[in-house]
Image: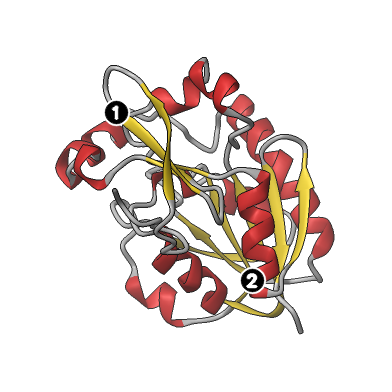
Amino acid sequence: MSACPLCHHVDITPFYRDKRRDYLQCTRCHLVFVPEFQRLDAQTEKAHYDLHENNAEDAGYRRFLARLATPLSEKLGENATGLDFGCGPGPTLSVMLEALGHRVALYDIYYHPDRAALDKTYDFVTATEVIEHLYQPDIVWQQWLNLVKSGGWLGLMTKMVIDAEAFANWHYKNDPTHVIFFSRATFAFLAERDKLELEFIGNDVILLRKPQ
């Protein structure tokens, strides 16, 4: 059975199974994840992303992103610099944060593969509907922490696991590009391990502050 792709713990238990995939859970950080052999290859994954039609002119999409943009902006000083990690083909959160007076760089492995953006540090890093897609969450999590300056913020949006009963009827798991699923307990584990301040806003917004 696989080790946890987030914390590398080897005590893994079955969590759920459907017709397409298995879902395992780490007994330490509580991450739920799809085994590596059941994930999509990169070409199939990108083809699925290409079907997304999010854009900065979509009022509904902007309302969705405002659930992160508004509380995050309230935490930031004036003229903060940030990185929108996994911005997708139609960057929108960056546009909204720039309208609030901040400067935002872009990075996306498929649509904005600007590696130079990963060589800097920022007052904040955002990743909206990204974390559930990560094949190497351990590496990317550390990368995010390295990108954030001391005292800076990591702002995330992702739907979170509640329990196995709710998971069985959860549409979120049915997206074939969703391969890991955090819970509040997972974020709490990381916050304690990495000495981060943690704040949950609603059901899917997570703010973490790096210590000074």
Query: For residue 21, which numbered disc appears in the image?
Result: 1
* Relative height, residue 77 to residue 74 (above, below): below
x then y, percent, for residue 199: 78, 54
Say whether residue 60 is left or right of residue 207. left
x then y, percent, for residue 64: 65, 33
Mark toward the start of the polypeptide (1 vs 2): 1
* Relative height, residue 120 to residue 202 (above, below): below
x then y, percent, for residue 154: 64, 63
Q: Nearer the viewer, residue 145 or 164?
A: 164
Q: Nearer the viewer, residue 86 or 144?
A: 144
Q: Which residue is mark 2?
A: 193
- Which quadrant holds residue 92? top right
Q: Quadrant of the C terminus?
A: bottom right
- Neighbours of disc 1 within 10 Å: few (<14), some (14-19), many (20+): some
Give the amino acid at mark 1: Arg
Give the amino acid at mark 2: Arg
As helix, strand or loop, the secondary structure at mark 1 comes to: loop
Q: How far, Cα to Cα, is label 1 from label 2?
A: 30 Å
* Relative height, residue 207 to residue 157 (above, below): below
x then y, percent, for residue 76: 79, 66
Say whether residue 78 is left or right of residue 22. right
* Relative height, residue 133 to residue 76 (above, below): above
| Residue at the (71%, 40%) spot, across then down | 66
Q: Is residue 95 visible?
A: no
As helix, strand or loop, the secondary structure at mark 2 comes to: helix
Figure coloring: secondary structure
Q: Is residue 131 visible?
A: yes
